[in-house]
Amino acid sequence: MLKIEKMNVYYNHIHAVQDVNLNVKKGEIVSIIGANGAGKSSLVKAIMHLVKFNASLFKLDEIDLLKGNADKLVSLGMALVPEGRQVFPDLSVEDNLEMGAYTVKKRELVKEKMKEMFLLFPRLEERKKQKAGTLSGGEQQLLAMARALMSSPKLLLLDEPSMGLAPIMVQEVFKIIKKINENGTTILLIEQNASMALNIADYGYVLESGRLVKEGKAQELLNDYDLKKSYLGG
Ligand code: ATP
């Protein structure tokens, strides 16, 4: 579904993403794990065309994203749940969801989608009139996910969804990611919480200092001796 070759991101003299090759197959959960400052956010932002990058190949299915399709990423089926949620704090839960559906022209479809989101996230339905800024961190994460799903993406990118959440909420967020995937959305998950991210994934990549240093089936990475020592706390 998503194929990238030799992606690079520079910030002046900092080479934040270095010759990254990525392949995300339809239906999978693919996790990219890495420590603080490894370049995870830079990579996601580059994939969403939010920072300058270069690449030798960048395709979403058969669509060439190096050839002027950057402004249509959401219409083409990509959506991002950004790091730190970035919900609109002064808008209600409902209005935040509406914002996620800005590419959806038909009112009926927006309403239908919202119903679907409230089924998937009952906590949000209970709080639909509440201002997003007054939700707990975990609820804001759920809202950011629901907002991204409003455009019915085929590929959902999540940038560190577990960041700053209590362990119980982290579990809930990961359960929902799994469910979203089971409902048919392909997932690219960027995470510092390596064991959680690999546990729900089909395939994984390890990013270190801007480079992908390891990749493989998620189960194999979970059993990898070096990764256990440096990322998996054992
Ligand atoms: P974290 O988990 O701490 O968010 P990360 O893996 O997402 O880290 P990035 O935020 O992508 O890492 O940062 C990678 C490198 O690029 C870091 O050295 C960072 O200081 C640098 N960097 C990121 N954004 C910018 C920017 N806008 N200007 C200059 N340097 C930047």
Image (cartoon, grey):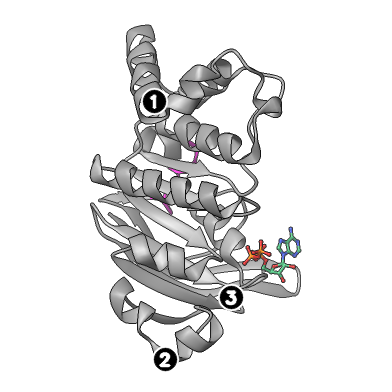
Q: Earlier in the sequence, mark 3 or mark 2?
A: 3
Name which quarter of the figure residue 74 lies in: top left
Name which quarter of the figure residue 85 lies in: top right
* Type of amino acid at the residue the image marks with label 3: Gly
Magenta segment, prevailing SS (helix, strand or loop): loop
Q: What secondary structure is marked by label 2?
A: helix
Q: Say which residue label 1 marks.
A: 117
Depth check: 148 or 227 in front? 227
How dense is the environment of label 3, judged by Cα within 10 Å: few (below 14), some, or many (20 and up)? many
* Residue 224 in sight in this render: yes
Q: What secondary structure is marked by label 1?
A: helix
From mark 3 to mark 2, how far is it between C-alphas? 22 Å
Q: Say which residue label 3 marks.
A: 210
Q: Say which residue label 2 marks.
A: 225
From mark 1 to mark 3, how far is it between C-alphas? 35 Å
Residue 230, x across and y down, in percent: 55, 85
Q: What secondary structure is marked by label 3?
A: loop
Magenta-drawn segment: 65-71
Q: Earlier in the sequence, mark 1 or mark 3?
A: 1
Q: Which quadrant does the N terminus fall into? A: bottom left
Q: Residue at x 66, y 74 (%)?
A: 15
Q: Which circle, 3 or 2, is nearer the viewer? A: 2
Q: CB at mark 2 closer than 8 A to ligand 1?
A: no
How dense is the environment of label 1, judged by Cα within 10 Å: few (below 14), some, or many (20 and up)? many
